[in-house]
Image (spheres, rainbow, N blue to C red):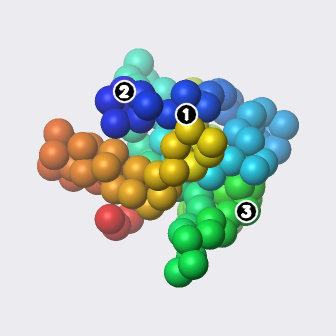
């Protein structure tokens, strides 16, 4: 979907359906540092609704991260951790499923800051749609 992400060979995705336990279906690496985006499947349409990242480069060049898994599962969205708030969101909006794609941007082969990679794909989205994904509040 985003050509900028093609170079990251350590990647994957999973589906989150109504009633699912995000802690069980999320297959993102617990030690992964990188970016993710979320597709919403609803009413016969597929839309990118969110772009996120996990990990920061510290002043000394070291990476600080809780891991992609933790960010996706426990990160706050809609006023609560995603493992809780996503089920409510799917139900309230009639969303059939979310398709979550993740990419490790900092590993043995690549050393790209997650913030940098997120900025690239956010800018691509903004250039194409002249707005941010619906669930992103700012860029």
Q: Which residue occupies the extreme top position in the image?
A: 44
Compare residues 41 and 115 and report the one nearer the observer. 115
Q: Give the structural element (helix, strand or loop) at label 3.
A: loop
Q: Which residue is mark 3?
A: 66
Compare residues 104 and 124 and report the one nearer the observer. 104
Q: Tell me whether the residue at label 2 lies in contact with that at label 1, contact meaning CB atoms closer than 8 angstroms.
A: yes
Q: Which residue is mark 1?
A: 101
Q: Tell me whether the residue at label 3 lies in contact with that at label 2, contact meaning CB atoms closer than 8 angstroms.
A: no
Q: Which residue is mark 2?
A: 1
Residue 23, position in %: x, y?
A: 82, 44
> Which tag, 3 or 2, sits closer to the chain's start?
2
Left-right relation of 88 to 51 = right
Could you tell me which quadrant the C terminus lies in?
bottom left
Q: Give the structural element (helix, strand or loop) at label 1.
A: strand
Real-space Cα separation, disc 3 to disc 2, in angstroms: 26 Å
Residue 10, position in %: x, y?
A: 61, 31
Residue displayed at 44% across by 31% down: 7
Residue 127, position in %: x, y?
A: 16, 46
Real-space Cα separation, disc 2 to disc 1, in angstroms: 10 Å
Q: Quadrant of residue 84?
A: bottom right
> Which tag, 3 or 1, sits closer to the chain's start?
3
Residue 29 visible: yes
Residue 45, position in %: x, y?
A: 38, 23
Residue 65 in the image: above or below residue 11: below
């Amino acid at each position: 979907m985003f050509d900028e992400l093609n170079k990251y060979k350590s990647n994957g995705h999973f589906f989150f359906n109504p009633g699912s336990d995000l802690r069980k279906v999320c297959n993102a690496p617990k030690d992964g540092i990188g970016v993710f985006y979320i597709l919403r499947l609803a009413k016969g349409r597929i839309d990118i609704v969110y772009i996120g990242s996990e990990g920061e480069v510290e002043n000394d060049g070291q990476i600080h991260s809780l891991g992609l898994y933790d960010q996706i599962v426990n990160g706050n969205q809609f006023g609560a951790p995603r493992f809780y708030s996503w089920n409510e969101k799917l139900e309230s909006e009639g969303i059939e499923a979310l398709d979550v794609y993740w990419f490790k941007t900092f590993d043995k082969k690549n050393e790209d800051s997650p913030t940098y990679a997120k900025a690239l794909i956010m800018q691509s989205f903004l250039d194409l749609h002249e707005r941010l994904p619906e669930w992103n509040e700012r860029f």
